[in-house]
Image (cartoon, grey):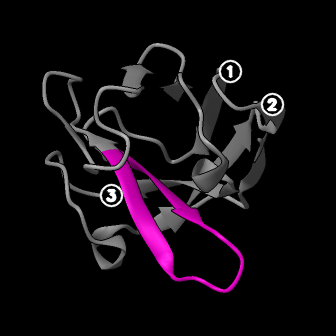
């Protein structure tokens, strides 16, 4: 089993920045791809970003491209999501996920482990 714990969420004004972190523990593997998803109230969980096992390949949802940056530190078993130029529509619970394969995926059904989520609220 792999445990994922997100941190770094909070309340920020529009235009501000937050950095989310996801710490992995348990039977972790640096060969796992990692992803971030988000879910706003009353909406489905949406893909935000993903990174492959080495950090050499990243993908982003169009809605966050150019504003968010995903990265990972395999020595620390941690993945990050730097969020800049935040908008009220970015308000959601953000979830970290791990995939037992090295390549990235857009779909939540390809991920095997999930964190509990961290709330991000962007005020206008």
Query: Bounds of the magenta span?
Result: 34-49
Going by the image, does 17 lie left or right of 37? right
Q: Which of the pair 122/9 is nearer the observer?
A: 122
Residue 44 lies in the magenta-colored region: yes
In the picture provided, is 18 more to the left or to the right than 9? left
Q: Are marks 1 and 2 in contact (CB under 8 Å)?
A: yes
Residue under pointer 3: 99
Helix, strand or loop at label 3? It is strand
Chain-order first, disc 2 or disc 3: 2
| Residue closer to the observer: 13 or 43 | 13
Q: Residue lying at the far front in this picture: please name it.
A: 124
Q: Position of residue 109 (x, y in %)?
A: 33, 79
Residue drawn where x is 60% and y is 46% of the image: 26
* Residue 44 seen in this snapshot: yes
Residue under the image location 62 percent in, 40 percent down: 25
Where's the C terminus, which quadrant? top right
């Amino acid at each position: 089993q792999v445990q994922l714990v997100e941190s770094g969420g909070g309340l920020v004004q529009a235009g501000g920045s937050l950095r989310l972190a996801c710490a992995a523990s348990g039977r972790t593997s640096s060969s796992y791809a990692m992803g971030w998803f988000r879910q706003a109230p009353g909406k489905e969980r949406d893909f935000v970003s993903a990174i492959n096992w080495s950090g050499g390949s990243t993908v982003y949802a169009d809605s966050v491209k150019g504003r968010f940056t995903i990265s990972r530190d395999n020595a620390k078993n941690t993945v990050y999501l730097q969020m800049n130029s935040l908008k009220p529509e970015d308000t959601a619970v953000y979830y970290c996920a791990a995939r037992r394969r090295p390549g990235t995926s857009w779909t939540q059904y390809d991920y095997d482990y999930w964190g509990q989520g961290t709330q991000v609220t962007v005020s206008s």
